[in-house]
Amino acid sequence: MGNSIFSDKNYDYILYLSIAELFLDGEKVEGVGISPDTYVDYPLKSNSGIDPQLDAAKSKLLELLKK
């Protein structure tokens, strides 16, 4: 991926746009949102070189893989 507003020095990001209604467990998500399973405080300083949300996701994935 090239540089865009969705890239930083360490990670590339993909923007996914929904063009249809999205349902999760039979309930409409569009306009309602989804509560996170794990809350991660994300500081506003995005150029710090760390991504606490990505780190928490990796840790959670490794936990699930150990089961």
Image (cartoon, rainbow, N blue to C red):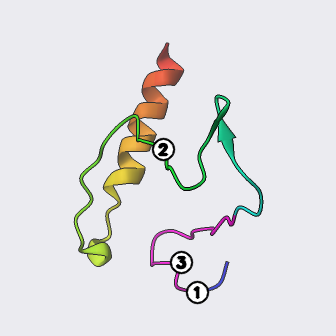
The residue carrying pointer 2 sits among few (fewer than 14), some (14 to 19) or many (20 or more) residues within 10 Å by Cα, namely few
Asked which secondary structure carries label 3, the reply is: loop
The residue carrying pointer 1 sits among few (fewer than 14), some (14 to 19) or many (20 or more) residues within 10 Å by Cα, namely few
Q: Residue at x 36, y 43 (%)?
A: 56
The residue indicated by pointer 3 is 6
Q: Which amino acid, by three-letter code, is at mark 3?
A: Phe
Asked which secondary structure carries label 2, the reply is: loop
Quarter occupied by the N terminus: bottom right
Measuring from the top left, give residue 25's x and y in whole percent.
64, 28
Q: Examine the image and state in which quarter residue 37 appears.
A: top left
Q: CA distance from mark 1 to mark 2?
A: 29 Å
As displayed, is residue 15 above or below residue 37?
below
Image disc number at residue 3: 1
* The furthest residue to the top: 67
The stretch of residues the image draws in magenta is: 4-17
* The furthest residue to the right: 20
Image disc number at residue 34: 2
Mark 1 or mark 2: which is in front?
2
The residue carrying pointer 3 sits among few (fewer than 14), some (14 to 19) or many (20 or more) residues within 10 Å by Cα, namely few
Nearest the eye: 14 or 62? 14
Q: Which amino acid, by three-letter code, is at mark 2?
A: Ile
Q: Which amino acid, by three-letter code, is at mark 1?
A: Asn
Measuring from the top left, give residue 49's x and y in whole percent.
32, 70
